[in-house]
Image: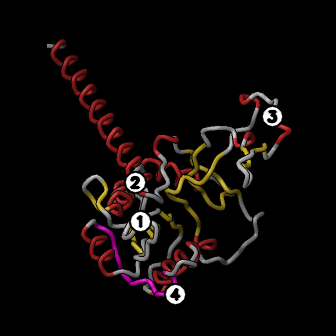
Amino acid sequence: MRIAVIPARGGSKRIPRKNIKLFCGKPMLAYSIAAARDCGLFDKVIVSTDDDEIAAIAKNCGADVPFIRPAELADDYCVIADVIKHAVEWCDTALLPVESVCCIYATAPLIAANDIVRGYNVFNQPGTRWVLAVTSFPFPIQRALRVNTDDCFEMISPENQLVRSQDLEDSYHDAGQFFWQGRAMALQQHRDENSGKNRVVVIPRFRVQDIDTEEDWLNTELMYQVLEQRALATAEAHSFLINREASQGE
């Protein structure tokens, strides 16, 4: 069985109730649930939460909430790996053995179902240990600066000061959208880094946004609205071309 696990605890600090706050008219959580359902890969889309209100909203959005997450797995120090392990163990107890699991973050409104599918296809490549959605840094991190307490700066890697930016290696970071892993890794049955390859799915930067502040929230809503308008314009142009070709063929 393949499952999606969407961690969504109730104790958001920087943006209170972030997981269910309305984002462009829908609860933030709804976008991750929709992407998981639309990709057509999962036998179950599980929202793991400790919060009754989040659970109710998740169910209304079409997700399964078969358990309420224990409090010890919902504090500020809990790690995602333990949340995934708990969900997989619950499925085992319910006689629903899991073969692979995709963790989808609850605050990823720009996530696309086809990227989850791309991740699964990469995950199925021989020798793959897990697959992480990443995106590239917009500027070479080899040129990063360190600012001191007296507002003076220095290069962190001064050896790169005279190197052309096009000659510097591209760098990537976690896109904060999803990752795929197999049963053994989800249950933390091995920690051997040499047991398989860690692969990536690269997401374009214009579809990635970390949301930690109100400014991040506003920027992401603007990005989402632009992408929606772009998709609508593309669909309308495609429909126009099809209708024109049909009329010319008469």
Verify CB contact (< 8 Å) between mark 1 and mark 2: yes
* Residue 187: assigned label: none
- Residue on which the image places disc 3: 161
* Distance CA(mark 2)–CA(mark 4): 28 Å
Is 26 situated left or right of 110 in this image? left
Residue 3 in view, yes or no: no
Q: Is residue 60 above or below residue 94?
A: above
Q: Looking at the rendering, in which quadrant would you find the C terminus?
A: top left
Instruction: For mark 3, give the secondary structure.
Output: loop
- Residue on which the image places disc 4: 72
* Mark toward the viewer: 2 or 4: 2
Q: Is residue 225 above or below residue 103?
A: above
Percent from the top left, x then y, of residue 34?
33, 58
Magenta residues, start to end: 62-74
| Residue type of the residue flagged with mark 2 | Trp
Of 167 and 239, the residue lying toward us: 167
User: Could you tell which of marks 3 and 1 lies nearer the N-terminus?
Assistant: 1
- Residue on which the image places disc 1: 15
Residue farthest to the right?
159
Percent from the top left, x then y, of residue 121?
54, 51
- Residue on which the image places disc 2: 217
* Distance CA(mark 3)–CA(mark 4): 47 Å
* Rendered residue at 27%/65% (across/down): 61
Residue farthest to the front?
150
Query: Quick one: label 3, few (<14), some, or many (20+) residues within 10 Å?
Result: few
* Distance CA(mark 3)–CA(mark 1): 38 Å
Query: Quick one: label 1, few (<14), some, or many (20+) residues within 10 Å?
Result: some
Percent from the top left, x then y, of residue 48?
42, 76
* Rendered residue at 38%/59% (across/down): 32
Is 235 situated left or right of 16 in this image? left
* Distance CA(mark 4)–CA(mark 1): 21 Å
